[in-house]
Image: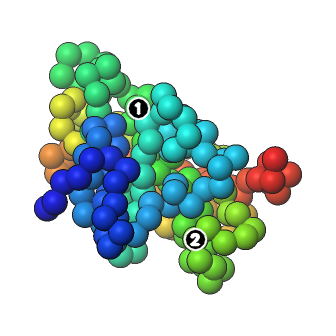
Amino acid sequence: MRIRGRGTCDGLVARMPIAGHGEDVEMGEKSFQEYYPEQLSHCYGCGRLNEFGLHIQSYWDGEESVCRFQPRPYHIAIPGFVYGGLIASLIDCHCTGTAAAASYRSEGQAMGTEPALRFVTASLHVDYLRPTPLGVPLEVRASVKEVKGRKVIMTATLSADGNVCARGEVVAVRMPEHLVTK
């Protein structure tokens, strides 16, 4: 695995950032979030233009999507463990990005083409299965359960060291056109 600084690319192969840590792993495409129009890139969780945000990045890995994130020491709940709000945010933003990518796929459109397909959360349910350790990279994987009209339903897992720590379901809805074009 080649490691490279965050946001860099050699022109041949993109890197999959371990968001929050500044390191990347090899990937062959842009993240879903890199296709968001500038006016829709300010989200705390996934907005590339939010200087204080988490900057998560999501990619297809076969029929699933994947995101990796390195929690920082200040993402603490109790010593040694990640706080639950971060876990919910990672699942939420990863799944809304996946909803956009899945919608582009189902409509036979290339990512980033017009009209911009951007999703917001209608429902977020998270089951915390075990304490999530701080200090190790987290991996979020999502699978699309259903794409129906303006709605996409996804299931997700968040793992640390190969152990599933949380499971979630997200219902995402396509952002109304008047909000997409502002």
Residue 52 in the image, given as x and y percentages of width and height: 48, 28
Q: Quick one: SS at disc 2?
A: loop
Percent x, y of residue 88: 45, 37
Q: Residue furthest front?
A: 10
The residue under the point 70% across, 46% down is 39
Image location (x, y in percent) of residue 152: 61, 63
Q: Secondary structure at mark 1?
A: helix
Amino acid of disc 1: Leu
Locate residue 3 relative to residue 33 in the image: left or right.
left
Q: Quadrant of residue 42?
A: top right
Residue 46, given in percent of the width and then of the height, sits at: 50, 44
Residue placed under numbered mark 1 in the picture: 86
From the viewer's side, name the closer residue of 65 and 31. 31
Residue 4 in sight from this viewpoint: yes
Label 2 sits on what residue type?
A: Met
Q: Residue 111's mark?
A: 2
Tell whether 82 sits left or right of 55.
left
Near-viewer residue (123 or 63)? 63
- Residue depicted at 21% across the width and 29% down the height: 134
In this rendering, does residue 140 appear at all? no
Mark 2 crowdedness (10 Å alpha carbons): few <14, some 14-19, many ≥20: many
Q: How is the image coloured?
A: rainbow
